[in-house]
Amino acid sequence: MGRIVGGMGRVVPKVTLDARAEAAALVAGARAEADAMRAQAREAREEAVRQGRAEGREQGRVEAAAELAALLADARLQTARAREASAPTAITLALKMTEQIVARAVTLAPELMAEIVGAAMDACRPRGDWVRVRVHPDDAAAVTARRDALSARAPAGAALEIVADEAVGRHGCVIETALGRVDARLETQLAALERALLEETHG
């Protein structure tokens, strides 16, 4: 059967109405499916953006960590180079300070000069029937004042002679025996210390 549409009394077949309804339903379904697809695409795009940002942050962290490690390695290298370059200056300064400290100590306590001579005698272990100690004239009085203590450190029965010698620098001595000579001048000892320190610094 048909249906009368409008005031004209036109009859629309039922099949046509059903087709329109079906078409409308199809259109609505297509729109709903399109909306769903657009929503999925939007979610996929947002997820891709989130993932891209996360990967970007992770990559940024990795690159930053690598750059930091490189900077630290370079800083260590530069520090080592600077330390090696400044070592001779630092050692020279330390030796000058040591020389001044010894000079100040002997000035305040002249008896220390006799201890310096005694330590040199112990180190060289003199043998024979005589021991000659050469010291700077300004140190001779302090050493001579302790002759007895120094004689006790010489070989038994050996004659101890103390000689003032301008060639020997302050605060050191030269020990001579029948078997040889030991240079225990302060400048000689400091030079030996400087060589040892420089060898140690440069491997």
Image: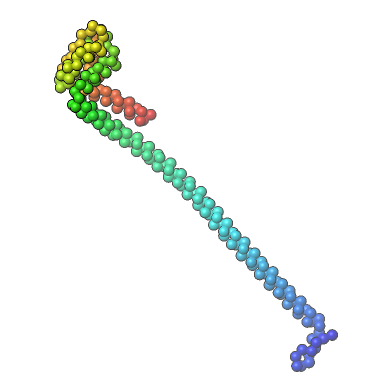
Residue 68 position, x and y percent, is 45, 46
Residue 13's image quarter?
A: bottom right
Residue 123's image quarter?
A: top left
- The residue shown at (24%, 24%) is 187
Quarter of the image for the N terminus: give it. Answer: bottom right
Can residue 14 be seen in the rendering of this structure?
yes
Residue 6's image quarter?
A: bottom right
Residue 95 position, x and y percent, is 26, 29
- The residue shown at (81%, 81%) is 15
Residue 185 position, x and y percent, is 23, 21
95 over 143 or under it: above or below: below
Quarter of the image for the C terminus: give it. Answer: top left
187 over 76 or under it: above or below: above
**Number of marks:** 0
Residue 33 position, x and y percent, is 69, 69
Q: Nearer the viewer, residue 100 or 179?
A: 100
Coloring scheme of the render?
Answer: rainbow
> Which residue sits furthest right?
1
Can residue 183 be seen in the rendering of this structure?
no
- The residue shown at (79%, 79%) is 18
177 over 173 or under it: above or below: above
- The residue shown at (71%, 74%) is 28
Q: Nearer the viewer, residue 129 or 86?
A: 129
In the displayed structure, does residue 48 sit left or right of residue 160?
A: right
